[in-house]
Structures are given as structure tokens and as C-alpha cells.
Image (cartoon, rainbow, N blue to C red):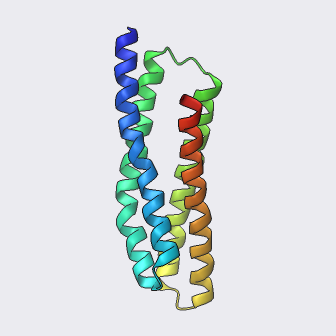
Amino acid sequence: MESIIAELLTYHLWLCLPLFLFPIINLYALFFYPSHTKRLKILAIAAPAYYLFLSASLFSGLVIWATLGFILTLKILAMVILWLIIFVAEIKRHKKQKMTRVESNPAIRESFFKWARLKYLFDFCAFGLIFILWS
């Protein structure tokens, strides 16, 4: 049974590692691309893959948790809470981006970009915290 759990943890780790990539790509676009249109395009292109890996990490985590008998530990609770915060914030970012896409006021767009930078910095730090918890 321990070998199965170890193998499941390996799969979970490999599904979660790309989650570091999307905040980095989006932060790069938000900090270094001068064009608002280009920034919005990069965020829109990366979003489906980000959702895919968020859902894959949730599914693989739930499989592991079920294998462990749904025992609630501090590590598991922290991962679930951080995943929920990241997922809800990503949905809010997506809704704000839809409104920003049609907005012509540059100040409103810049406030969205500032919020998105903070969100992706939080995501990157949260994933780092989760990986530190497991090591």
C-alpha cells in the first residue's frame, strides 16, 4: 500500500510542478510587455492550461486523500485552503479581465494589471509554500 501511495504522490508532484510555470509566464507578461493588448492576450492564452493543471492537481490530490482514508492533517488542510483561494481568485481575475478587455480607460486597465500581478505573486508564493510543506 505504501508503494501505491508513493507512486500516487509522484504523479501528483508531476501534475503540480507546471503550476509554477503559469504565474511566472503571466508575471513576465505583466511586468515586461508594454502593450495592454499583448498582456491581456498572454493572460487569456495561459488561463485554460492553468485551469487544466489546477484541476489535475485537485483530482490527483483527492485520489491520494481518498487512499489515505480522508484523514485531515494540517498539510492537507493547508493545500485545500490554498487551492480554493487560488482557484476563486483566478475566476475573479478572469471576470475582471473580461471587463478590462472592453474598457478604454488606461487607469482602469492599469489597476487590473496591478491586481493581477499581486494575484500571480501570491499564487507563486502559495505553490512554494505547499512544496515546502511537503518536503
Give the position of the N terminus as an image quadrant: top left
Corner quadrant of residue 25: bottom left
Taking the image as shown, residue 26 lies to the left or right of residue 123, namely left
- Nearest the viewer among 119 and 102 is 119
- Residue 129 in the image: above or below residue 135: below
- Residue 109 in the image: above or below residue 79: below
Q: Position of residue 48 (x, y in %)?
A: 36, 58
What number of labels is visible? 0
- Nearest the viewer among 40 and 128 is 128
Residue at image coords 60%, 28%: 75
- Nearest the viewer among 37 and 96 is 37
Q: Position of residue 35 (x, y in %)?
A: 45, 86
- Residue 25 in the image: above or below residue 132: below
Q: Position of residue 104 (x, y in %)?
A: 52, 91
- Residue 94 in the image: above or below residue 15: below
Give the position of the C terminus as an image quadrant: top right
Outermost residue, top direction?
1
Residue at image coords 34%, 15%: 4
Q: Position of residue 21 (x, y in %)?
A: 41, 54
Residue at image coords 57%, 17%: 71
Residue at image coords 48%, 58%: 23
